[in-house]
Image: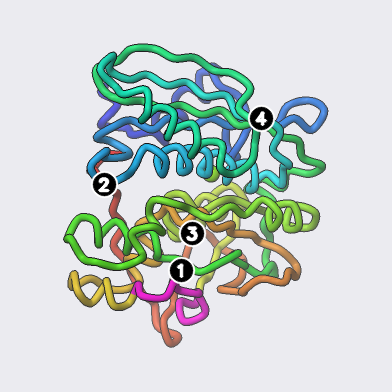
Amino acid sequence: MQLSEIGETGLLAELERRGLVLGIENDAAELAGGLVVTQDALVEGVHFRLDWTSWRDLGYKAAAVNLSDLAASGAQPEALLVTLAVPGATLLADVVQLYEGLSEPGVPIRGGDVASAPRATLSVTAVGRSKRVPGRSGARPGDALVVTGPLGGSAAGYLALAEAIATPLRDAHRRPPLRLREGQLLASTAHALMDLSDGLVSDAERIAARSGCKLVIELERVPIVDGVKEVAERVGRDVWDLVCGFGEDYELLAAVGDAPFPTIGWCEAGAGVELRLQGEHHEVSRWRHFGDA
Ligand SMILES: [Mg+2]
């Protein structure tokens, strides 16, 4: 069996079945004393291209995607640990730019490692503390589904980079939002909370599966980043593919009784995720950039 056949989800399920990893269903590991830890690796050619991103933006994004998992845990960040592996010919000035980007969110870098490698790989660990981690398993019929901000910007930005379309949305792909305050607010009452890294449909499916209920999303209520419709038209795709099927929005999705954020749907008895557009069932295509990222 090769990893490409089972994917990340299949690998983790297999390791969990063997008792080799524990409690990995949430965005971050919750340890004793409210300690929350998360880690993400970015590999050149898989997760980023140095001709599409500056070193500074790469650093910012690496910090932001980890802080997004802390936000999804309702955590206050305390530190980042950074491991960087790059070719020896890499310029010092570029690495300084990378660390300036990593420092931009204002969370101190307290350690890590540097190694030599044939292509750039960046791994960031974020550590924080949370009073309450809602996780993904507590959504129940009657909950409202809310998101903390508009979606589709990263998908449109990625397509704009790929198709050489000039639009400010390129930055939406390179510089995801930070929703730490919103995460702490939602975590105090949400029954389920996660960040949107893999696309609204795929991520909502995780809450549905872990919570044992059905999530219904009314697409006309989903907030969309300005300019996404125009990019979708330019590339001949359904705008809802960009909004729901791509990912990397890094907004938060919560199942909650009530919260001061846009409501996009609800939970009910059943299983899976249903998208509706003008009351009709709607399907979206899902895709990942760089094939297997
Ligand atoms: Mg996450």
> Residue under circle 4?
79
What amino acid is found at the position of numbered circle 2 in the picture?
Trp
Callout 4 amino acid: Ala
Q: Nearer the viewer, residue 196 or 26?
A: 196
To which residue does mark 1 refer?
A: 274
Query: Decide: marks 4, 1 in contact (CB < 8 A)?
Result: no
Distance (Cα) linking label 2 and label 1: 35 Å
Is the C-beta separation of discs 1 and 3 under 8 Å?
A: yes
Q: Check disc 2: other Cα within 10 Å, few if <14, some if 14-19, many if 20+.
A: some
Q: Position of residue 207 (x, y in %)?
A: 57, 52
User: Which structural element holds mark 4?
Assistant: strand
Residue 248 among magenta residues: no
> Which residue does the image show at 58% across and 57% down from the upper left?
252
220 falls in the magenta region: yes
Looking at the picture, how far across and down is residue 174, in whole percent? 39, 51
Residue 49 vs 116, above or below: the answer is below
* Label tally: 4
* Magenta residues (range): 218-228
Which numbered mark, 2 or 3, is in the foreground of this view?
A: 2
Task: State the image quarter where residue 34 is shown.
Answer: top right
Mark nearer the N terminus (4 vs 1):
4
Quadrant location, the C terminus: top left
Which quarter of the figure has residue 243? bottom left
